[in-house]
Amino acid sequence: MNRDRLEGSWDQVRGNVQKAWGKLTNDDLDVIEGDRKILSGKIQERYGVAQDEAERQIDKWTDEAVDKTKDHTH
């Protein structure tokens, strides 16, 4: 996935983002619109974590999403 922008249609990805970070509201997701930096800030805000922890969570989530995509294409 792109480091700055979450790939794919945001409408499809946003459901997975909300599953991963359930404290994010629909309004949060409307603001994020696939922007990784904004997602990181919202995770920090809602979960009270530091920026590096939010980034680690996003990296883990995107890596898992890429792995799932690879599993479906092979």
Image (tube, helix red, strand yellow):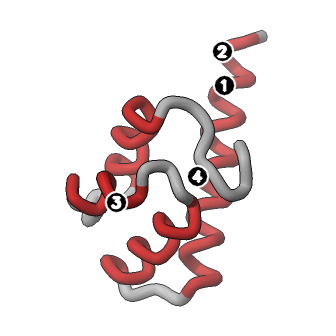
Query: Looking at the rendering, in which quadrant would you find the C terminus?
Result: top right
From what the image shows, is residue 68 above or below residue 61? above
- Residue at the top extreme of this rendering: 74
Q: Position of residue 2 (x, y in %)?
A: 72, 47
Q: Which residue is mark 1?
A: 69
| Secondary structure of residue under mark 1 | helix
Task: Say which residue appears at 46% left-offset and 77% top-offset.
Answer: 41
Give left or right: position of 36 versus 1. Answer: left
Disc 2 crowd rating (10 Å Cα; few below 14, some 14-19, many 20+) is: few
Q: Residues within 10 Å of mark 1 (few under 14, many from 20)?
A: few
Whether pointer 1 and pointer 2 mark residues with C-beta atoms closer than 8 Å, the reply is yes
Amino acid type, residue under disc 3 in the picture:
Val
Residue drawn 63% across the image and 48% down it: 62
Which numbered disc flags the more N-terminal residue, 4 or 1? 4
Residue 31 is tagged as: 3
Among the two numbered marks 4 and 3 on one chain, the one whose residue lies closer to the N terminus: 3
Report the residue marked by disc 4.
Answer: 61
Contact between marks 2 and 3 (CB within 8 A): the answer is no
Write the residue at 29% across / 62% down: 28
Image vertical order of residue 31 relative to residue 45, above or below:
above
Q: Are marks 3 and 1 in contact (CB under 8 Å)?
A: no
Q: Real-space Cα distance between discs 2 and 3?
A: 30 Å
Tell me the residue that label 2 is attached to.
Answer: 72
In the rendered image, the quadrant that contains the N terminus is top right
Question: Is 55 left or right of 47, judged from the image as shown?
Answer: right
Distance of mark 4 from mark 3, alpha carbons? 19 Å
Label whose residue precedes the other's in the sequence (3 or 1)? 3
Mark-to-mark CA distance, 3 and 1: 26 Å
| Amino acid bearing label 4 | Trp
